[in-house]
């Protein structure tokens, strides 16, 4: 049972990574025709409305959120839905999709650090060293002196989005009373509406119909379905390990940007990508065997039951 749960969590995280990773360079292709806040709103509205329609078609039962989980959900929506997408779109507007995609590796680092420091998830040596490799790669990408990256504020915007999504990941893991599609739907509708409203406040105009349709379809898969899969992964393997498996997303984004959008592979990109690849490999190959107590809650996360892995509940 534990093995099946672990495997489904791993596959869900990898599926979420593939969808979100490919969506990043595709989103950049539309940013020349619309504002960053407007497009962020369209992405999340597409996710929320699309999943809402899917729930109606499937006639899924009404969700009943436990009151104690409301604060976790609100925090997740604000951090990961309202603030992070707009920051990513702003960063994408002013830097190549390849570099922005690779910088998204920072989300795995921030997710693991918050899971370790705040929620007391175990972090092994491999994960710790993997974090250092990913941070080193981010430092290489952020190093001044290349025309591709321009000023440092777009990089700061992307890293800020990563930090906010990491907070979102750790908050969402505590929302267990409702199914993943409901969480993604609510986050999409609230975050999408807020970002569109902010776009109007800052003077952004309504884009052409094809941009609206494309953004909402892209959002359904890259943000909606991806988020559903990631919530499943959070429940299956925990925030730190879900973030580790999810860290393949930036490489998928970089590959799409290079293969389909003709972005150049610079020495800086290659070196940073190599460091981050080592870090990701260390995360993916880390094992989980230790003694730890849990508070008295229902929970699902990765376990390898053996004589050295005992629990006090």
Image (cartoon, rainbow, N blue to C red):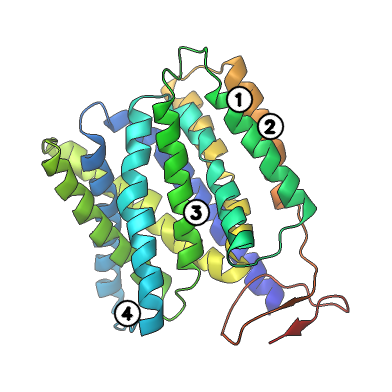
Disc 3 vs disc 4: which is toward the camera? 3
Would residue 229 be found to the left or right of residue 70 on screen?
right
Q: Which one is in front in this view, the residue at disc 3 or the one at disc 2?
A: 3
Callout in the foreground (2, 4): 2
Q: Nearer the viewer, residue 269 or 30?
A: 269
Residue carrying label 3: 166
Q: Seen from this angle, which residue lies furthest right? A: 307
Viewer-closest of 181 and 36 = 36
CA separation, marks 3 and 2? 21 Å
* Rendering quarter of residue 237: bottom right
Local packing at callout 4 (Cα closer than 10 Å; few below 14, some 14-19, many 20+) is few
At x 11% / y 39%, what residue is drawn?
A: 206
Kindly identify which residue carries mark 4: 60
Q: Residues within 10 Å of mark 3 (few under 14, many from 20)?
A: many
283, above or below 91, in the image: below
Which disc is residue 275 wearing? 2
234 relative to 261 in the view: left or right: right
N-term-proximal mark, 2 vs 4: 4
Circle 3: element type: helix
Percent across and percent down for residue 170 are 51, 63
Q: Which residue is mark 1?
A: 140
Q: Nearer the viewer, mark 2 or mark 1?
A: 1
Residue at the farthest front position:
117
Residue at the image position 64 percent from the left and 61 percent from the top: 116
Disc 2, disc 1: CB below 8 Å?
yes
- Of discs 1 and 4, which sits in the foreground? 1
- The mark that comes first in sequence, 2 or 1, is 1
| Label 2 with label 4: CB-CB less than 8 Å | no
């Amino acid at each position: 049972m534990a093995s099946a749960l672990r495997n489904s969590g791993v596959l869900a995280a990898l599926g979420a990574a593939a969808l979100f990773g490919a969506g990043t360079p595709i989103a950049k292709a539309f940013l020349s025709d619309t504002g960053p806040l407007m497009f962020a709103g369209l992405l999340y509205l597409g996710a929320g409305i699309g999943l809402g329609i899917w729930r109606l078609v499937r006639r899924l039962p009404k969700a009943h959120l436990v009151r104690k989980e409301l604060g976790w959900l609100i925090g997740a929506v604000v951090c990961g839905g309202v603030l992070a997408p707009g920051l990513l779109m702003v960063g994408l507007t002013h830097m190549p999709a390849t570099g922005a995609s690779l910088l998204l590796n920072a989300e795995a680092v921030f997710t693991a650090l918050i899971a370790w420091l705040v929620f007391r998830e175990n972090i092994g040596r491999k994960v710790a060293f993997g974090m250092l490799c990913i941070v080193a790669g981010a430092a290489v990408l952020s190093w001044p002196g290349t025309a591709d990256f321009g000023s440092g504020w777009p990089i700061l915007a992307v890293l800020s989005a990563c930090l906010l999504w990491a907070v979102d990941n750790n908050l969402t893991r505590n929302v267990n009373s409702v199914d993943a599609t409901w969480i993604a739907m609510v986050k999409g509708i609230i975050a999408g509406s807020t970002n569109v409203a902010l776009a109007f406040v800052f003077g952004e105009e309504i884009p052409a119909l094809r941009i609206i349709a494309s953004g909402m379809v892209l959002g359904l898969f890259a943000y909606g379905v991806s988020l559903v899969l990631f919530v499943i992964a959070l429940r299956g393997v925990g925030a730190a390990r879900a973030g580790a498996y999810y860290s393949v997303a930036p490489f998928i984004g970089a590959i799409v940007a290079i293969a389909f959008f003709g972005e150049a592979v610079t020495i800086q990109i290659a070196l940073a990508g190599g460091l981050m690849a080592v870090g990701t490999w260390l995360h993916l190959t880390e094992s989980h065997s230790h003694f730890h107590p849990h508070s008295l809650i229902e929970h699902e996360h990765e376990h390898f039951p053996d004589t050295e892995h005992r629990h006090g509940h």
